[in-house]
Amino acid sequence: METTASVLGPSRPPVHVPGGIARAACLVLALVLAGCASRSDMSGVQPRAEGTGGAIRQQAFGTTPAGDPVTLYTLSNTGGMEVEVITYGAAIKAIRVPDREGRIANVALGFDDMAGYAGQTAYIGAVVGRYGNRIAQGRFTLDGQAYRLAQNNGPNALHGGLMGFDKRVWAASETTGPEGPGLTLTYVSLDGEEGYPGNLTAEVTYRLTDDNALTLEYRVTTDRPTVQNLTNHAYFNLKGEGSGDILDHELTLDAERFTPIDATLIPTGEIRSVAGTPLDFTEPRRIGDRIDADDEQMRFAGGYDHNVVLDRGLASGLTGGLRRAAFVREPSSGRTLEVLTTQPGMQVYSGNFLDGTAVGAGGRAYGRRSGFCLETQHYPDSPNQPSFPSTALRPDAPFTSTTVFRFGTDGQG
Ligand code: BGC
């Protein structure tokens, strides 16, 4: 396979900070953030921009079933972290980060080849759209006009339909900037595709900074009113992909409320407090602690598969800056993942439907609960739920959102 590499050049932040000081500042901030595992107000936290020495390279990654070529991009930073992204589904293929001893592992589930991606049904790593998550009965009405979608998940529409954005090849362009190497992926979804109105342009930019943060910036435009809800469907296992289940991971959610579901996993419309429920992760808890509790919500989903209302939530509007949504720590490796987002909700999914049929990059089967997803998003079924934040997209108002996956370690040996 042909590989081309380009090291990011002279782009620098306007004020030069000596590397040692920058690294020390980074470490202090990382420790402070790690210490925020219990509930805290992270309002206004922005991704930092010390990154200067990253690189991006590309290589061929086979073809789709229709014969279209797919490209694999590898972003790397000066700390040895690497992120692989493919143009098929704009999918995150791998994320390599150190544990507390400095040992690198791939913490994102993914496949070695295009056959793995074309054959999977779990949306592993992909950007899902045009509407991530469910729309009840595959129907919605917008501006008085009724639309019908494929019912590809029981009675409901899921993740954009029969051939959603996860199964499309996105156009790629490399970007460089003071923050680190970036890759912008663009997909144009035509009017009527999968039943949705409007020619819609979806753009996601992945950027890797030197402080081990992967930033995802979304921008979505349309030429006719439509609905949209893009999210990334990466599955994480901070022990390393293929290392068994994720039940020992400790999860903290900055969410005091969630949207309870019915037996088909559609929100009932209620916004319920997490207090006293298995969804209460306002203090760090093992994912496995209450996953099989005798609780209707857990039974409906076979574990966690719920949208949480992030604390910025309904009350304070949707346009605020980045806030922390989740913090995850895996005790044996010490790896941590912090999720920041501008979105109002997040699907917390414990990989209940992974069934061992998909064999991952390391040759190991992905069994039930072998990865978890934190899908930052608007709430499921919003087009049918007038009280939820709107997912309508109109020609005069592009949609933008930002999500950050920041990796670290707990420093405990
Ligand atoms: C959904 C799950 C679904 C999974 C597909 C998640 O976003 O909430 O119910 O099975 O995606 O991989």
Image (cartoon, rainbow, N blue to C red):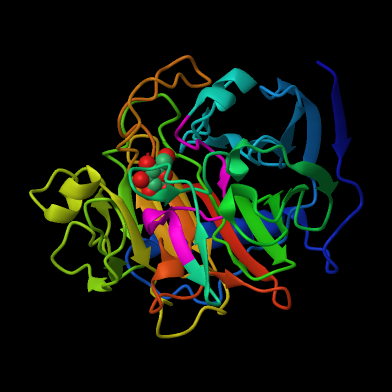
Where residue 246 sits, quadrant-wise, is top left
Where residue 309 sits, quadrant-wise, is bottom left
Residue closest to the eye, 65 or 235: 65
**Residue drawn at point x = 27 percent, y = 39 percent:** 248
When the figure is inspected, residue 386 is found, relative to residue 213, above or below; the finding is below
Say which quadrant the C terminus sits in. Answer: top left
Q: Is residue 80 visible?
A: no
**Residue drawn at point x = 63 percent, y = 63 percent:** 47
Q: From the top left corner, tell me how far across and down residue 208 is, in percent.
A: 68, 48
Where residue 62 sits, quadrant-wise, is top right
> Which residue appears farthest toward the right when viewing the image?
10
Give left or right: position of 116 versus 353: right
When the figure is inspected, residue 36 is found, relative to residue 75, above or below; the finding is below
Q: From the top left corner, tell me how far across and down residue 306 is, in percent.
A: 31, 56
Number of numbered discs visible in the structure rendering: 0
> Which residue appears farthest toward the front when viewing the image?
145
When the figure is inspected, residue 185 is found, relative to residue 385, above or below; the finding is above
Q: Is residue 139 magenta?
A: yes
Quadrant containing ligand 1 reads: top left
Give left or right: position of 262 versus 395: left
**Residue drawn at point x = 40 percent, y = 61 percent:** 35
Q: From the top left corner, tell me how far across and down residue 105 is, in percent.
A: 52, 29
Q: Which residues are magenta?
A: 121-140
Q: Is residue 101 magenta?
A: no
